[in-house]
Image (cartoon, rainbow, N blue to C red):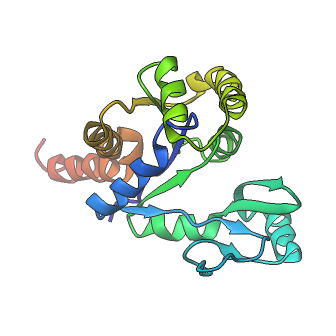
């Protein structure tokens, strides 16, 4: 079985990346969503191992010290991070593992796992970024402008990602992401074992033919 691909989806607020992830998991059976670890308490309805791995501060810091996290951050007094073990287990099963995280975490992982694929999702224009945030109807103009300023900072590092995905029409966008992953599976760097087998096979076949 071919090992799965670790891929990361980031994007501006309002880009629809969460919806894309849900649709990928619903439509295709080759994906697994990475489950993060956190030190915060479970909220009503959340389950250990499904929504998060809920651990103590001491356990989380042991994971940090042992190199057991692909990335982590501290937010409002709690740790959040991506455990290596869960991701590697799913990759070994041949699953393509999705991480929906912000840019800082994405670039942390890229440094540790150069073979990870980074995708940045965005609407077709900056004006559409604003329109989608406005359409939510859940935030003040001040908050929306704060998100737009954050988006301007995020735009400065888009070129560190491997692929840019334009989310203009959802079905096409989901298909674009899926097709990109399928093409990545065919990259020679991900098929070294098969290539080596072919080389040996030709040598074996031809050794008595000359």
Q: Nearer the viewer, residue 187 or 204?
A: 187
Q: Is residue 87 above or below residue 98?
A: below
Side of 55 relative to 110 (left or right): right
Q: Nearer the viewer, residue 23 or 90?
A: 23
- What residue lies at 32% left-to-right and 65% top-to-bottom? 1
| Residue 87 on image: x %, y % | 55, 64
Side of 196 relative to 9 (left or right): left
The answer to whether any part of residue 53 appears in the image is: yes
| Residue 124 on image: x %, y % | 41, 22
| Residue 147 on image: x %, y % | 67, 31
Q: Is residue 32 above or below residue 201?
A: below
Q: Nearer the viewer, residue 36 or 17?
A: 17
- What residue lies at 49% left-to-right and 27% top-to-bottom? 131
Side of 43 relative to 16 (left or right): right
Labels in figure, total: 0
The answer to whether any part of residue 30 appears in the image is: no
**Residue 130 found in image quarter:** top right
| Residue 158 on image: x %, y % | 58, 25
- What residue lies at 20% left-to-right and 47% top-to-bottom? 202
Q: Quadrant of the C terminus?
A: top left
């Amino acid at each position: 079985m071919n090992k799965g691909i670790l891929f990361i989806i980031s994007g501006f607020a309002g880009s629809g990346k969460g919806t894309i992830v849900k649709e990928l998991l619903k439509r295709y059976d080759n994906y697994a969503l990475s489950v993060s670890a956190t030190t915060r308490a479970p909220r009503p309805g959340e389950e250990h191992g499904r929504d998060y791995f809920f651990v103590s501060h001491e356990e989380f810091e042991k994971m940090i010290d042992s190199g057991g996290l692909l990335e982590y951050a501290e937010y409002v007094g709690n740790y959040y991070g991506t455990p290596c073990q869960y991701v590697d287990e799913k990759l070994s099963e041949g699953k393509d593992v999705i991480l929906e995280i912000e840019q800082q975490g994405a670039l942390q992982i890229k440094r540790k796992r150069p073979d990870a694929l980074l995708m940045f999702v965005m609407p077709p224009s900056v004006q559409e970024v604003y329109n989608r945030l406005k359409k939510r109807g859940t935030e003040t103009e001040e908050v929306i402008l704060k998100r737009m300023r954050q988006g301007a900072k995020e735009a400065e590092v888009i070129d560190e990602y491997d692929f840019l995905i334009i989310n203009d029409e959802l079905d096409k966008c989901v298909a674009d992401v899926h097709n990109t992953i399928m093409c990545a599976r065919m990259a020679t760097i991900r098929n070294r074992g098969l290539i080596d087998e072919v080389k040996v096979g030709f040598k074996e076949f031809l050794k008595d033919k000359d």
